[in-house]
Amino acid sequence: CITDIFVNTVFLLNTVHNFAVQAIEPGNMGVKERKERERVEMRDKILQSAHKLFLDRGFEEVSIRNIAEAIEYSPATIY
């Protein structure tokens, strides 16, 4: 089923990003490192919210707007 494939892909991407966040040391951050950490954290937040919505509603019933509302950001942030 396409939903199962998507959910598994989101889970895998989420796991990879969690390792990336852990690899960046908060105490030794310059602007570039901080922005990268924030980018990774935002992506992780989007993926987690999408994953939850897909499980709750099904893949076909979730829109970008739904994901944006769940993370309290504009849809443009997701793009």
Image (spheres, helix red, strand yellow):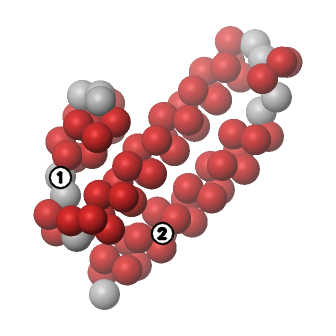
Task: Indicate whether 75 appears above or below 62.
Answer: above
Looking at the image, can residue 45 be seen? yes
Residue 56 lies left or right of residue 65; in this view the side is: right
Image quadrant assignment for residue 62: bottom left
Write down the residue under mark 1. 63
Write down the residue under mark 2. 9
Helix, strand, or loop for circle 1?
loop
Residue 62 lies left or right of residue 33; in this view the side is: left
Image quadrant assignment for residue 54: bottom left
What residue do we see at 68% from left, 12% from top? Answer: 31
Instruction: Name the residue at the top extreme.
Output: 31
Pinpoint residue 26: horizontal percent, then vertical percent: 78, 23
Q: The C terminus is located in which quarter?
A: top left
Crowd rating for badge 2 (residues with CA inside 10 Å; few <14, some 14–19, many 20+): few
* Mark 1–mark 2 distance (CA, rounded to whole Å): 17 Å
What residue do we see at 46% from left, 41% from top? Answer: 45
What residue do we see at 64% from left, 29% from top? Answer: 37
Pinpoint residue 33: horizontal percent, then vertical percent: 71, 22
- What amino acid is labelled 1 in the image? Ser
Helix, strand, or loop for circle 2?
helix
Q: Earlier in the sequence, mark 1 or mark 2?
A: 2
Pinpoint residue 42: horizontal percent, then vertical percent: 48, 34
Pinpoint residue 15: horizontal percent, then vertical percent: 63, 58
What residue do we see at 54% from left, 31% from top? Answer: 39
Task: Indicate whether 36 appears above or below 27.
Answer: below
Residue 70 lies left or right of residue 26; in this view the side is: left
